[in-house]
Amino acid sequence: MERRTLLGRLIWQLGEVVATQPETARTKSITLNLPGWSGHRAGQHVDVRLTAEDGYQAQRSYSIASSPEEAPRVTLTVERLDDGEVSPYLTEELRVGDKLELRGPIGGYFVWEAEMGGPLLLVAGGSGIVPLMAMLRHRSAAESTVATRLLYSSRSLEDVIYRDELDRLMKRSTMLEVAQTLTRAHPPGWTGYSRRIDLQMLREVAWPVAQRPLTFICGPTPFVETAAAILVELGHEPARIKTERFGPTGEKHDGE
């Protein structure tokens, strides 16, 4: 109901690409200038629409990676899917100066603003880091001191999106802790976790139940369901756990 209501008020608008930034071999950040942008909240997403010369249109949803403080510029981070219709164009063909049609922002559930407080627990799988990165960037821009922990699962070190920026944010704030796990390949000397997220890992990383953290989980559907179920098993309140998912059985989001 919320999505239908919001879409009824939204219009498509053209943004100009002002910067692109490769994040990994398969992901790229695209920054658009949107003079008519009404602003967004960290965690929201937009719809992107491509129109072919013959009129065929393809539409996908992507999380906003930038903080609200960067408006009217908006950054999307897109993962290329080899069999996708939209992501190969966005990651390989789109250039600075091109125009991109989008509408948004969309969503009022999976959002965090500094005044909501914490402690904050963020759990990301793969490109599920994107909306959580908007929260971390907002936290930094707002100079928030909310105690925050991020648990980020990737296949390999090369697949870690925003790796350098996460390091910088962690060094800048003693109240931000980042734990990473690599599920497939581990470089020599790796000191993080080396397996899929499980009960023991979340027991070690998550805030104690008594501190009632606000929790945001984003990633592929099985990842999100596993992480949320474990946190509930550990005693965390379901009402304080918000999830965003993508994949075959989830909402199309951050991919195809």
Image (tube, rainbow, N blue to C red):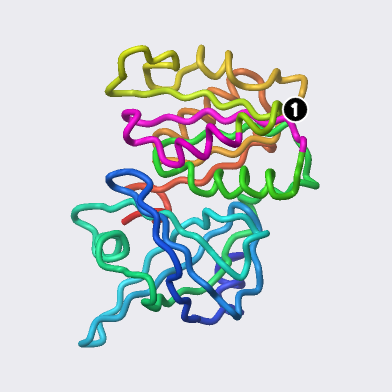
* Quadrant location of the C terminus in the rendered image: bottom left
SS for tag 1? loop
The image quarter containing residue 77 is bottom left
**On screen, residue 215 above or below 93:** above
**On screen, residue 149 above or below 38:** above
Residue type (three-letter) at the residue carrying disc 1: Arg
What residue do we see at 67% from left, 31% from top?
A: 148
- Which residue in the protein does label 1 denote? 212
Q: Residues within 10 Å of mark 1 (few under 14, many from 20)?
A: some
What residue do we see at 55% from left, 45% from top?
A: 133
What residue do we see at 43% from left, 13% from top?
A: 191
What residue do we see at 69% from left, 49% from top?
A: 141
- Residue 186 horizontal/vertical position (percent): 31, 19
Left or right: residue 155 versus residue 132 is left
The image quarter containing residue 153 is top left
Does the magenta portion include 157? Answer: yes
**On screen, residue 69 above or below 212:** below
- Residue 124 horizontal/vertical position (percent): 49, 36
Left or right: residue 3 versus residue 52 is right
Furthest-bottom residue in this view: 54
- What's drawn in magenta, residue-wise? 145-169
- Residue 106 horizontal/vertical position (percent): 57, 65
- Residue 194 horizontal/vertical position (percent): 37, 16
* Quadrant location of the N terminus in the rendered image: bottom right
Does the magenta portion include 20? Answer: no
